[in-house]
Image (cartoon, coloured by chain):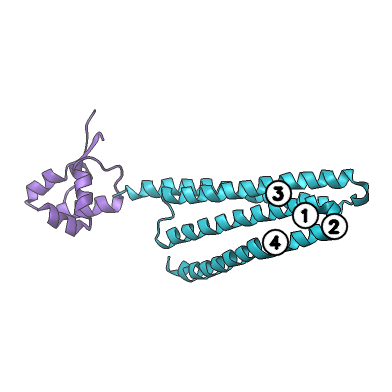
């Protein structure tokens, strides 16, 4: 996908583990993995809302478009 | 799902009863009835044997439909109905109905022609009834085909939604 979800960067900035992030956002670690390795096809706004809230960032900090 | 559970159980009870009824019809009632008719009117014996063959085939088709419906109901209860598996069972149902309808239409056409060409039998009652049955059957079969495409669309929607995180 030309849309990359940069969770790992934001997690590293906040020194938060993937497991803790998954639990606080309310996603399964499997779905977090799907987001991170670019296999996600769609994300709910409510999921995006939860991720931005936990990481205290904007959707633009999480989503990046690259030309393939 | 919780509210459909009692209906599912009731439906399965009736399906078992229907299957048992069809079995009795198939092995006892129908052969006896038509062989008696053949004895009563030997000149129309071939019609009686044709009707026996047709009714046995129709009962067999209904039995296939009952079994497939049972499988589909199990899928509904397991919340698996919107998966490619259920389409296979629906296909069998469609084919069973199609075969049953084709046999009915064929026999109806033959009987109508036979009644028309036999002056002492000529009467519009039976052909009209048969024609009505064939029409109702055609509408029903095509409706099931439409329901099948709706199920396929719903299956695609479900698999799309399952990928949303």
In the displayed structure, does residue B57 sit left or right of residue B150? right
Q: Which residue is mark 1?
A: B48
Disc 3 secondary structure class: helix
Residue B9, percent across and down?
49, 70
The cyan-tinted chain is: B
Label 1 vs label 2: CA separation?
9 Å
Within-10-Å neighbours for mark 2: few <14, some 14–19, many 20+: few
Q: Sequence-wise, which precedes: disc 4 or disc 2?
A: 4
Disc 2 secondary structure class: loop
Label 4 vs label 2: CA separation?
17 Å
In the displayed structure, does residue A47 sit left or right of residue B138? left
Report if residue B3 is visible in the image: yes
Label 1 vs label 4: CA separation?
11 Å
Within-10-Å neighbours for mark 4: few <14, some 14–19, many 20+: some
Foreground: disc 1 or disc 3? 1
Mark 1 on the same chain as mark 2:
yes
Chain at tag 2:
B
Image marks 1 and 3: residues in contact by CB distance under 8 Å? no
Mark 3 on the same chain as mark 2:
yes
Label 3 vs label 2: CA separation?
23 Å
Q: Which mark is residue B33?
A: none
Report if residue B142 is visible in the image: no
Q: Sequence-wise, which precedes: disc 1 or disc 3?
A: 1
Mark 1 on the same chain as mark 4:
yes
The purple-tinted chain is: A
Q: Which residue is mark 2?
A: B41
Numbered-mark total: 4
In the displayed structure, does residue B150 sit left or right of residue B126? left
Q: Sequence-wise, which precedes: disc 1 or disc 2?
A: 2
Within-10-Å neighbours for mark 3: few <14, some 14–19, many 20+: many
> Which residue: 57% across, 69% down?
B17
Extreme residue toward the top, this view: A68
């Amino acid at each position: 996908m030309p849309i990359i979800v940069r969770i790992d960067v934001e997690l590293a900035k906040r020194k938060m583990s993937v497991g803790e992030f998954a639990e606080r956002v309310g996603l399964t670690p499997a779905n977090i993995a799907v987001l991170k390795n670019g296999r996600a096809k769609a994300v709910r706004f409510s999921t995006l809302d939860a991720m931005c809230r936990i990481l205290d960032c904007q959707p633009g900090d999480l989503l990046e478009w690259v030309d393939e | 799902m919780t509210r459909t559970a009692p209906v599912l159980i009731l439906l399965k009870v009736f399906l078992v009863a229907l299957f048992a009824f069809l079995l009795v019809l198939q092995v006892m009632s129908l052969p006896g009835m038509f062989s008696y008719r053949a004895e009563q009117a030997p000149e129309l014996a071939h019609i009686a044997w044709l009707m026996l063959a047709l009714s046995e085939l129709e009962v067999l088709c209904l039995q296939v439909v009952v079994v497939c419906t049972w499988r589909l109901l199990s899928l509904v209860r397991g919340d698996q109905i919107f998966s490619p598996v259920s389409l296979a069972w629906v296909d069998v149902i469609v084919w069973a109905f199609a075969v049953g309808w084709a046999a009915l239409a064929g026999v109806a056409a033959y009987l109508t022609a036979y009644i028309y060409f036999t002056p002492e039998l000529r009467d519009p009652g039976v052909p009209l009834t048969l024609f009505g049955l064939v029409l109702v059957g055609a509408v029903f079969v095509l409706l099931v085909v439409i329901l099948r495409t709706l199920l396929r669309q719903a299956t695609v929607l479900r698999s799309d939604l399952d990928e949303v995180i």
